[in-house]
Image (cartoon, rainbow, N blue to C red):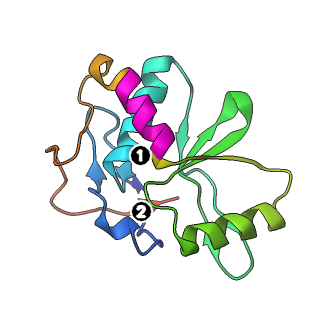
């Protein structure tokens, strides 16, 4: 089975709790509990979503937003840490793709969503939550 996802490029992304969440999908490899929780939230709210469906060239570097919401033609990036790397990548993306709609869910907004919805959504992951991670990753498709 092909798994959607690849290695994170952000220096901080490697610290996330990566893995497949069987309650969300058997074939999506999330890099963090926040990404998995956003997928759970979109599903709970009935929002159609796709995980990392497209990569954009931002001038010598490829950038893949976390989600695409087809109904609103919007890409979504979920960011716990907004450092210089993220800021520069965001600026390059907006400069090279000015007509593409990108929303960034930063920590403050994520925590508000968590407070409002986590108790309603089964398998919501909090800090230090356990989940099933496959023993090895199979072929990656983006």
Give the image location of residue 36, x and y in percent: 36, 42
Spot occupied by residue 44 in the image (x, y as percentages of width and height): 42, 20
In the image, taking residue 33 as reference, residue 68 lies left or right, namely right
Q: Are marks 2 and 1 in contact (CB under 8 Å)?
A: no
Residue 136 horizontal/vertical position (percent): 20, 63
The vertical placement of 91 against 24, above or below, is below
- Label 2 Cα neighbours within 10 Å, binned few <14 / some 14-19 / many ≥20: some
Label whose residue precedes the other's in the sequence (2 or 1): 1
Residue at the image point whose x is 41% and y is 46% from the top: 35
Q: Residue at x 39, y 66 (%)?
A: 13
On screen, residue 25 versus residue 85, left or right, reads left
Identify the residue at image location x=40%, y=38%: 111
Which residue is most to the bottom?
60
* Image spot of residue 2 (x, y percent): 38, 54
Q: Tell me the element at label 2.
A: strand
In this view of the protein, which residue sits in the foreground, 17 or 53?
17
> Left or right: 75 with respect to 24?
right
Q: Main secondary structure of the magenta part?
A: helix
The residue pinned by badge 2 equals 140
Picture quadrant where residue 95 is located: bottom right
Residue placed under numbered mark 1 in the picture? 35
Q: In the image shown, does 15 or 53 lie closer to the viewer?
A: 15
Q: Please check the rendered image and state whether residue 110 is part of the magenta-colored stretch, yes or no.
A: yes
Residue lying farthest front? 108
Q: Which residues are magenta?
A: 108-116
State the residue at coordinates (43%, 65%). 6
Say if the magenta span includes residue 62: no
- Mark 2–mark 1 Cα distance, whole angstroms, equals 17 Å
Q: Residues within 10 Å of mark 1 (few under 14, many from 20)?
A: many
Q: How many marks?
A: 2
């Amino acid at each position: 089975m092909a798994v959607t996802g690849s290695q994170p490029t952000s220096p901080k992304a490697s610290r996330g709790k990566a893995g497949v969440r069987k309650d969300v999908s058997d074939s999506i490899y999330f890099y963090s509990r926040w990404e998995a929780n956003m997928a759970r939230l979109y599903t709970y709210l009935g929002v159609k979503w796709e995980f990392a469906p497209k990569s954009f060239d931002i001038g010598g570097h490829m950038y893949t937003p976390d989600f695409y919401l087809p109904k609103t033609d919007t890409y979504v990036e979920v960011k716990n840490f907004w450092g210089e790397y993220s800021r520069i990548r965001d600026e390059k993306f907006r400069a090279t793709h000015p007509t593409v709609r990108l929303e960034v869910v930063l920590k403050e907004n994520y925590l508000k969503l968590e407070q409002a919805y986590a108790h309603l959504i089964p398998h919501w992951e909090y800090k230090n939550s356990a989940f099933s991670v496959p023993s090895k990753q199979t072929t990656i498709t983006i």
